[in-house]
Amino acid sequence: MGRHIKRREHGQNRQGSGAVHLQHQRRFVRPAAAQIKGQILSGALSAGDALPSMRTLARELRISVITTKRAYEELERDGFIETVTGKGSFVAAKNADFLREETLRRVEGALQQAVEAAQRGGISPAEMRGMLELLLEEQ
């Protein structure tokens, strides 16, 4: 008995091609958006600051203009930037509560990763608290 491999006929869609597109979007769009978001949260970019054009940013990051457009759309949807047709994209005015909430969300995520790593490594909650206290004292 021989094995028979069913070949895809010309014009047939591959299963899961939408998932590949979604992975591509996550792989490039999110880091581009996160980089700008990080600069806004750190204060490196302030309300009203102009962002580079989509073409310029695409060239700098070596990604497509479409990917840059999606990153800007994500930032605008999340309230980090405002886009003015014909003028460009600018850092949106934020209130302190929004920035604090975003920072808390990011810190919580980092702490969650640390807790998971500690659990995998057999580090007790008491040891974790001690390390956190030590780190806080060093600041």
Image: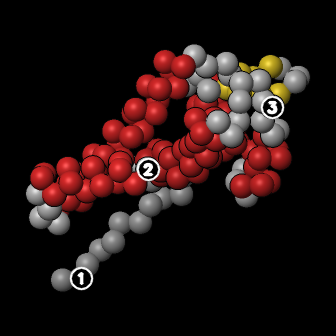
Q: Identify whether 82 is placed above or below 70.
A: above
Q: Residue at x 77, y 55 (%)?
A: 60
Amino acid type shown at disc 1: Gly
Q: Residue at x 81, y 40 (%)?
A: 52
Distance from Cα at disc 1 to Cα at disc 2: 68 Å
- Residue 25 visible in rendering: no
**Percent position (x, y) of residue 96?**
54, 19
Between disc 1 and disc 2, the foreground one is 2
The single residue placed furthest to the front in the displayed view is 137
**Figure quadrant of residue 138:** bottom left
Query: Residue 2, labelled with which disc?
Result: 1
Q: Earlier in the sequence, mark 2 or mark 3?
A: 3
Q: Secondary structure at mark 3?
A: loop
Disc 3 + disc 1, Cβ < 8 Å: no
- Residue 6 visible in rendering: yes
Quadrant where the N terminus sits is: bottom left
Category of crowding for the residue at label 2, using alpha-carbon neighbours closer than 10 angstroms: few (below 14), some (14–19), many (at least 20)? few
**Percent position (x, y) of residue 14?**
45, 53
Q: Is residue 92 left or right of residue 126?
A: right
Amino acid type shown at disc 2: Gln
Q: Is residue 106 left or right of residue 37?
A: left
Amino acid type shown at disc 3: Ala
Between disc 3 and disc 1, the foreground one is 3
| Residue corresponding to mark 3 | 50
| Residue corresponding to mark 2 | 139
